[in-house]
Image: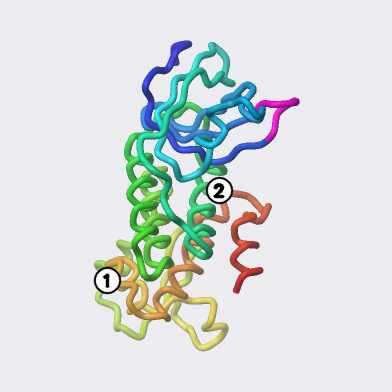
C-alpha cells in the first residue's frame, strides 16, 4: 500500500482513546480493507471531527503513513448516520466486532465493504433483525473463503426426516442413528431452509444461529464477543 490514501469510502468499526486528545481508529475501507489509524487531537474541545468519528456514519477519509498504522488527515461525512437503536444497534455492533476479529489489516475487498454497507441499510429498515444477521454471516463466511458447504444435503435424496451433524472444519455428516442426542443435530428440512434463506420460522432461525455460531467459532477464538453480552443483558 502506498503512503497516501485519498478520498476513500470508510466506516468506523471501533475507536479508543490514545494519549491526551487522540483516538486510535479501526476503519473498514472500500479498497484497502481494515485499516488502523490515529486521529490526532480529535478529543479536544476545538476539534471539528469528533462528531464525525462515530460508528455507522458513511465517511470519506484521507490517510497517510508508510507503516501499518496510518494517520487520519481528513474526514467528512457522506450522509447522515443510520438511526439504529436497541437491538438494531446491538446487531450492528455485532457486525463491527465480527469484521474486526476476522479481517486482516490492509487486505482490501470491495465485496465485503458492500456487504457491510447493504446489511446496515437492511438493519435500519427491517422489522426483524435476525434474518438480516444470518444472511450477513453466511455471505461473510463465503467472501472470507470459509463458506459452509451445503452440497451434501442440497443435492441429497435423503428423506426429509434425515439428520446431520456439523463440524466447522469438516462440514456436514449424515447421522445414521439420530435417536440419541438429537438436539445436537440438524434436520434435513431445516438445513434446506437455511440454504435457501427461508427464515420465516422461528425454528429455522434457531438452527441457523447455532449453525453459524459453530462455523465462526474456529475463526474468532474462545474470547466471547462483547456484542453478544449486550444482547443477553437486554433480553
Q: In which quarter of the image is the C terminus?
A: bottom right
Give the image quarter of residue 29: top left
Q: In this view, does 121 lie to the left or right of 51?
A: left
What residue is pinned by disc 1?
156
Instruction: Residue at 55%, 48% (x, y): give it.
Output: 97
How crowded pointer 2 is (Cα within 10 Å; few <14, some 14-19, many 20+) is rated as some
What residue is pinned by disc 2?
97
| Residue depth check, mark 1 versus mark 2: number of the one nearer the observer | 2
Location of residue 78 with respect to 47 vertically, above or below? below
- Measured as percent of width and height from the top left, residue 80 is found at 39, 43
Question: Which element type, helix, strand or loop, lies under badge 1?
Answer: loop
Location of residue 77 with respect to 118 vertically, above or below? above
Question: Which element type, helix, strand or loop, lies under badge 2?
Answer: helix
Q: Check if mark 1's residue and mark 2's residue have beta carbons within 8 Å.
A: no
* Residue 19 inside the magenta-drawn segment: yes
Instruction: Residue at 66%, 36% (x, y): give it.
Output: 16
**Residue toward you, 78 or 146:** 78
Instruction: Residue at 42%, 17% (x, y): give it.
Output: 5
* Residue 56 inside the magenta-drawn segment: no
Q: In this view, does 119 lie to the left or right of 51?
A: left
Give the image quarter of residue 7: top left
- Measured as percent of width and height from the top left, residue 102 is found at 52, 43
**Residue toward you, 185 or 97:** 97
- Measured as percent of width and height from the top left, residue 53 is found at 53, 35
Location of residue 23 with respect to 182 vertically, above or below? above
- Measured as percent of width and height from the top left, residue 202 is found at 41, 80
Q: Is residue 165 left or right of residue 181?
A: left
Measure how far apart labels 1 and 2 are at the Cα level. 36 Å
Q: Quadrant of the N terminus?
A: top left
* Magenta residues, start to end: 17-23
Q: Which comes sooner in the sequence, label 1 or label 2?
A: 2
Amino acid at each position: 500500500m502506498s503512503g497516501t490514501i485519498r478520498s476513500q469510502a470508510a466506516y468506523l468499526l471501533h475507536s479508543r482513546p490514545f494519549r491526551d486528545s487522540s483516538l486510535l481508529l479501526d476503519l473498514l475501507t472500500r479498497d484497502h480493507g481494515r485499516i488502523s489509524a490515529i486521529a490526532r487531537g480529535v478529543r479536544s474541545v476545538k476539534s471539528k471531527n469528533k462528531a464525525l468519528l462515530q460508528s455507522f456514519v458513511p465517511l470519506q477519509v484521507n490517510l497517510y503513513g508508510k507503516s501499518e498504522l496510518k494517520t487520519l488527515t481528513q474526514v467528512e461525512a457522506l450522509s447522515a448516520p443510520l438511526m439504529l437503536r436497541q437491538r438494531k444497534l446491538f446487531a450492528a455492533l455485532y457486525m463491527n466486532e465480527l469484521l474486526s476479529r476476522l479481517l486482516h489489516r490492509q487486505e482490501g475487498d470491495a465485496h465485503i465493504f458492500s456487504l457491510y454497507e447493504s446489511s446496515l441499510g437492511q438493519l435500519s429498515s427491517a422489522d426483524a433483525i435476525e434474518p438480516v444477521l444470518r444472511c450477513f454471516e453466511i455471505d461473510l463466511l463465503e467472501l472470507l473463503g470459509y463458506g459452509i458447504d451445503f452440497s451434501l444435503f442440497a443435492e441429497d435424496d435423503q428423506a426429509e426426516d434425515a439428520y446431520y451433524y456439523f463440524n466447522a472444519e469438516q462440514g456436514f455428516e449424515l447421522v445414521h442413528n439420530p435417536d440419541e442426542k438429537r438436539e445436537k443435530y440438524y434436520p434435513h428440512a431445516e438445513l434446506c431452509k437455511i440454504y435457501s434463506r427461508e427464515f420465516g420460522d422461528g425454528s429455522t432461525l434457531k438452527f441457523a444461529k447455532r449453525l453459524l455460531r459453530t462455523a465462526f467459532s474456529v475463526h474468532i477464538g474462545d474470547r466471547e464477543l462483547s456484542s453478544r453480552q449486550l444482547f443477553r443483558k437486554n433480553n
